[in-house]
Amino acid sequence: MDKKRGRARYELTTEQWHKIKDLLPGKAGDRGRTAIDNRLFVDGVLWILRSGARWSDMPERYGKYKSIHKRFTRWAMKGVWEKIFMHLVKDRDNEYLMIDSTLVKAHHQATTYKKKGRLWGVPEVA
């Protein structure tokens, strides 16, 4: 836990949370269940994406990794993540929109390693 900021590494600051909280599904008044843990869920997703770890290695403080992964996938299919990104893009002072090699990690299978006559990461020609 980052003692200076009162939060764990990779988690949203209060200012960052306030920028996106109203864009997330599960608010009071939304159809369906009301989410009481959206911030914890988003922090868990950020932990996975920023650390490069497997979902099964997610710290227990974020909840069950299978549930988090399932919810992450549902939100992706509904376009929630894209909606958040498009909202944040409008803020020209947003320092977190810059992507460089220090933030992006590729899985070892993303390489073009040739195995059994086929390159990994390259679609198989039919």
Image (cartoon, rainbow, N blue to C red):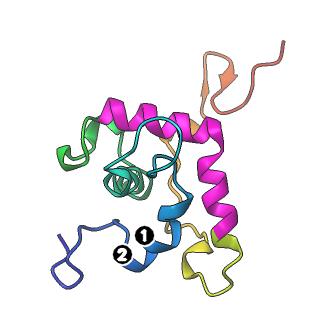
- Decide if residue 91 is on the left or right side of residue 54: right
**Whole-number angstrom distance, CA of label 2 to CA of label 1:** 6 Å
Residue furthest right in the image: 126
> In the figure, residue 12 lies in which quadrant?
bottom left
Where residue 55 sits: x, y (%)?
35, 38
Q: Amino acid at mark 1?
A: Trp
Which residue: 59% across, 81% down? 94
Q: Is residue 35 above or below residue 83?
A: above
- Asked whether residue 114 is in view, the answer is yes
- Decide if residue 2 is on the left or right side of residue 70: left
Which residue: 60% across, 48% down? 80
Q: Secondary structure at mark 1?
A: helix
> In the figure, residue 4 lies in which quadrant?
bottom left
Which one is in front, 84 or 8? 84
Residue 86 colored in magenta in the image: yes
> In the figure, residue 125 lies in which quadrant?
top right
Residue furthest front in the image: 29
Residue furthest top in the image: 126
Q: Secondary structure at mark 2?
A: loop
Q: Which residue is mark 2?
A: 13
Where residue 65 sits: x, y (%)?
30, 35
Q: Amino acid at mark 2?
A: Thr
Q: Give the magenta-colored segment's residue range.
A: 65-87
Mark 1 residue crowding within 10 angstroms, few (<14) / some (14–19) / many (20+)? some
Q: Which residue is mark 1?
A: 17
Which residue: 24% across, 41% down? 63
Which residue: 26% across, 35% down? 64
Circles 2 and 1: CB atoms closer than 8 Å: yes
Q: Nearer the viewer, mark 2 or mark 1?
A: 1
